[in-house]
Amino acid sequence: MIFPTWALAGFWGLVSGSALLIGAVLGYYAHVPQRLIAATMAFGSGVLISTLSLELMEEAYHKGGFNATALGFVGGAAAYTLANWLLARQGAKHRKRSGDHQRVEREKVQEGGQQATEPGADNGMALAIGALLDGIPESIVIGLSLLAGGTVSVVAVVAIFLSNLPEGLSSAAGMRKAGRPARYVFLLWGGIMLVSGVAALLGYSVFSQFPPQVVAATTAVAAGAVLAMIADTMIPEAFETTHNFTGLITVLGFLLSFFLSKLDG
């Protein structure tokens, strides 16, 4: 049975997004050591950096040239940074931290001590929007990869899956320490998993109608947003515990993604 390409895009988006829910279950119930969470976050960062360097930016450059790629890349990073700054004011700055950062931040929001919040407020909605902000660019990439030749980029799917696992793991561990109930945590990450599938589907369906330059710029936008996300939310969590080993672990993640890209080629 042959499935339509848009359905394949949605399916692979769901597959990569499922790692968020798997990681959340592990982070909430398994009490994974903080050092291991930080190490997996560093490894996932390396995987993503390799993918956006060797897959996304190269693909964008070949399709649209340097100008469209550069404009999209910087624009994606700028848009993510602005949105992340606004969310930080609402109490979602530490949404991927596994330690006590989320608990402290939630208490500050509830006391009205956080910018743009009032006493008695909560940051649950800001956390949900932040999770969407982090997940959508990665998922759109999967849909865009299908535009190249009708087959999904295995490297992109594996890389996003491997990076999503520690993201869900770390964030859920922090949410548990912040007093979030399991229902909230799993509904949040289950919802983001479904949104990942929809974003991948739309990434293919919508942009299949556009010229290569627009697809290239959009791919670069996603790459810029992902790199900004890594620098703002993943690397800080990794470095806090692994310290001097962060660089080495990140390099190993990069190497794995590089190896997979050569197998896929």
Image (cartoon, rainbow, N blue to C red):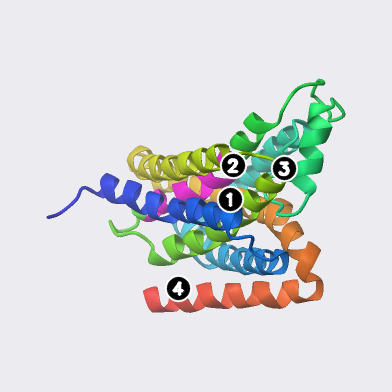
Residue 224 or residue 86, whichever sits in front: 86
Classify mark 3: residues with Cα within 10 Å, few (<14), some (14-19) or many (20+).
some
The quadrant the C terminus occupies is bottom left
Q: Secondary structure at mark 2?
A: helix
What amino acid type is highlighted by mark number 1? Asn
What label does residue 178 carry, if any? Answer: 3
Q: What residue lies at 66% left-to-right and 47% top-to-bottom?
A: 176
Q: Secondary structure at mark 3?
A: loop
Classify mark 1: residues with Cα within 10 Å, few (<14), some (14-19) or many (20+).
few
User: Which residue in the structure is indicated by mark 1?
Assistant: 67
Instruction: Give whichever of discs 4 and 2 has the lower sequence position.
Output: 2
User: Which residue in the structure is indicated by mark 4?
Assistant: 261
Task: Tell whether 38 sits left or right of 140.
Answer: right
Residue 147, image x, y percentages: 34, 52
Residue 197, image x, y percentages: 39, 44
Instruction: Give whichever of discs 2 and 3 has the lower sequence position.
Output: 2
Range shown magenta: 131-145
Q: Is residue 265 visible?
A: no
Query: Which mark is nearer the camera, 4 or 3?
Result: 3
User: Which residue in the structure is indicated by mark 2?
Assistant: 131
